[in-house]
Amino acid sequence: MATIKPPKGLSPEARKIWIELQEEYGIDDAAGLQLLNIFTHAFDRAKDCKAAIDKEGLQVADRFGVMKSHCLTTVERDARGQMMTALKALNIDVEVLHDKPGRPPGR
């Protein structure tokens, strides 16, 4: 299989994830590559939003001094949703496998 390069504009971390997923799952069709692009761009967006929220707080004051939810919380949520949707469409299981059936201990 020919090496397929990640798209430009991704963070180094997203490029690494793109390469790992592409190689591990052999994603080389146009639709799969587009879903991988969606996943990695959403990953970067969620990461950027989280950094801003961590810096500025979950709530920010509006121009009248009233505390409101940070506007990036919805953008981060939507980006994470896009990530999960892309992984599902790629048929990549994100469920952690357990060594035995049942609920994990301590719950």
Image (cartoon, helix red, strand yellow):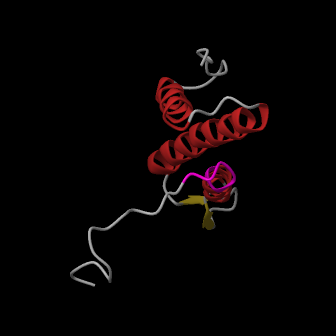
Q: Residue at x 70, y 40 (%)?
A: 38
Q: Residue furthest front?
A: 1
Query: Picture quarter containing residue 45?
Result: top right
Q: Residue furthest right?
A: 30
Would residue 26 be counted in the magenta stretch?
no
In the image, residue 106 sits, relative to residue 12, either above or below, namely: below
Give the tally of numbered discs.
Answer: 0
Query: Picture quarter containing residue 84?
Result: bottom right
Front in this rendered view, residue 2 or 21 = 2
Q: Residue at x 70, y 32 (%)?
A: 33
Query: Picture quarter containing residue 34?
Result: top right
Magenta stretch, residue numbers? 87-92
Q: Position of residue 35 (x, y in %)?
A: 71, 41
Front in this rendered view, residue 83 or 94 = 94
In the image, residue 97 sits, relative to residue 101, either above or below, namely: above
For residue 107, side relative to residue 38 (left or right)? left
Query: If the image is split into quadrants, where does the N terminus sit?
Result: top right
Q: Position of residue 55 (x, y in %)?
A: 45, 45
For residue 106, side relative to residue 19 (left or right)? left
Q: Position of residue 105 (x, y in %)?
A: 22, 80
Q: Position of residue 95 (x, y in %)?
A: 46, 63
Q: Residue at x 28, y 84 (%)?
A: 107
Q: Residue furthest left?
A: 106
In the image, residue 5 sits, relative to residue 61, either above or below, namely: above
Q: Residue at x 58, y 15 (%)?
A: 3
